[in-house]
Amino acid sequence: MRKRQAGGRPSAAQRQALDRLQLKGEETPLVERLSGLTALLDFTTGLASGLAGEDTLDAALLIVTRELRALRGAFFVRGGDGGLEVRASRGLPPGAPSTLGFSAPGVDFAAVGPGDEAHDRHGLVLLVAIERHDRPVAVLGLGPREGGRSYGAEERGFLRSVVAGAAAAIESRLLYDELRRAHQKLSRKAFELHNLFDLSRDLTEGSAEEAVQSLVLTTVMGHFLVSRCALYLSGPRGLGLAHGRGLRSQVERPPIPPEEAPAALEGLSGPTSVADLPDGRLRRRLEEDRMDLVVPLAVGSRVEGVLAVGPRASGMPFSEEDRDIAHALARQATAALNTARLLRVREEKQRQDRELQIARGIQRSLFPPGRPEIEGYDVAAESRPCHEVGGDSYDWIPLGDGRLALVTADVAGKGTPASLLMASVHAFVHAQAGVVSPAQAMERLNRFLLARTQTSRFVTLFYAELDAARHRLAYVNAGHVPPYRVGRDGTVGRLTEGGPALGLLADATYGVSEVGLEPGDVVALVTDGVTEAQSPDGREFGDDRVCAALRGLSGRSAPAILEGLVETVREWAGAGGFSDDLTALILKVQ
């Protein structure tokens, strides 16, 4: 017999031979065998042309059912989860399931009848296992044959040939599908890693918390294709909305109070559906904002907030892979936010350091250089701030004709604000010294401070003018620690005349007093950092100890008296150091 023509169809001569072999509408055994061989050739040729996809299997199923006169049939192919799924079907009952509820049979053929799912729901009577290397890869199911004929030995032989030809092609298709799924999974992972890399790179370039929050939410919306998401962070006021995208509510809602926030976040260890959260304020808040997924923002075991994600535009739920990538994004966000906070703290510290440097420079510029030279008198002074910058000051101002103004002052408060206020006081005193009387100078300074400072800011100040030729000291005390006047005989007096602290009372007046000075007398001007210095057990140094120290030191020079007094106070304070700024000015009559 001549070879078949291309395309797998019988030639004209073959068809004529087949027609001559037809006897009264019935096929002879030879005709049946030729028909079966032709069908088998068509089947194998079709499978060989591709990877047994749905179209190929559908064409192959048509050949098999037509050849066997089967009323219905289906190819069930092993899916990714190992179950059998319908990949091609013909004539199955309406509503027949797309899967077969059991594994491939362990024998070549399995007849099924009433009570079997394949019979009752798919209308099949015969299942044929398609195996490859003793591993089931598919099942061919067939329904009843026309005329009620059974599947005899010849039909089963034909089916064995069909199975032998189909096994390799179906297995190749399964491997192809598995590789495609693996490729898709790898592509998705690569996309997720790319997003994480881009986010990490961009976050390292950002600094402000607001910029970090905006970048994180933009990444989340773009990756998951959602229309809204938000960051809820814990703060001094509690757990509240830090940054949101796509939220409809424009009303600012109060945060969850600090005492309730830890309980609201307790138990969050990974991505969770909002519907699975315990009933509480956090869940109700997220439901109001129409969120679907909540991811904790954790530092170690401490949850500091949550990343909330709205539903996807496609309506698809979040898969486990989606939850994993959301968790990774949340960890990136937490690390970046903490870095931004630390950067903000560092910048604030740097700003404060710059301010302190400026304040230290201002304070150093206020102290007079060296020691004044005035005949018959010895002067020494020192100021030790308890912090970087103090609010104490001392000064001496030459007035000409053997006259010298002496000043000690203490501004309420410490640090940069105190040093700036002291600079104003220093400039004002220099402008008034020797121009007006000490009382007038204090009254003017009081009005100046009332007009330009806060009510909580005030200054205590002692101002004196020394007339070296007359050995007289005129002074005014504006709420300051009264200076100590120690005579050669050890008697101690206090210089108290004056008025209230500067910057407190609008109608304050100040009186001036004058004392005479004898050789050997010591006048000690101090701030409350000396008298109120505390010992480790909380006791103040006090006036009595100042007097005792000055009596014991009065025979020395002014620098020696100053050094001894400061050392005595330092020993009293102990290792804890001074709790307040300490300033002392010593005037010794030679």
Image (tube, rainbow, N blue to C red):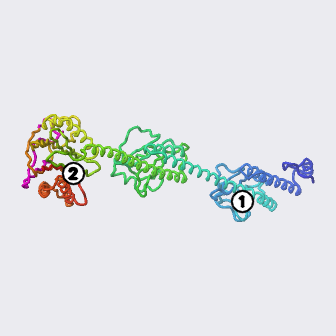
The image shows residue 159, relative to residue 385, as above or below, that is below
The magenta segment is 481-509
The image shows residue 289 at horizontal and vertical percentages of: 44, 43
Question: If the image is split into quadrants, where does the N terminus sit?
Answer: bottom right
Secondary element type, mark 2:
strand
Q: Name the residue tied to disc 2.
A: 582
Viewer-proximal residue among 134 and 582: 582
Secondary element type, mark 1:
strand
Q: Determine whether label 2 and label 1 are within 8 Å by CB.
A: no
The image shows residue 195, relative to residue 450, as above or below, that is below
Please, what is the three-letter code of the amino acid marked with disc 1? Answer: Leu
State yes or no: residue 57 in magenta. Answer: no
Horizontal arrangement in the rendering, residue 572 relative to residue 495 (left or right): right
Please, what is the three-letter code of the amino acid marked with disc 2? Answer: Leu
* Residue 23 shows up from this direction: no
Q: Name the residue tied to disc 1.
A: 127
Residue at far front of view = 375
Horizontal arrangement in the rendering, residue 262 relative to residue 76 (left or right): left
Q: Which one is closest to the eye, mark 2 or mark 1?
A: 2
Viewer-proximal residue among 77 and 112: 77
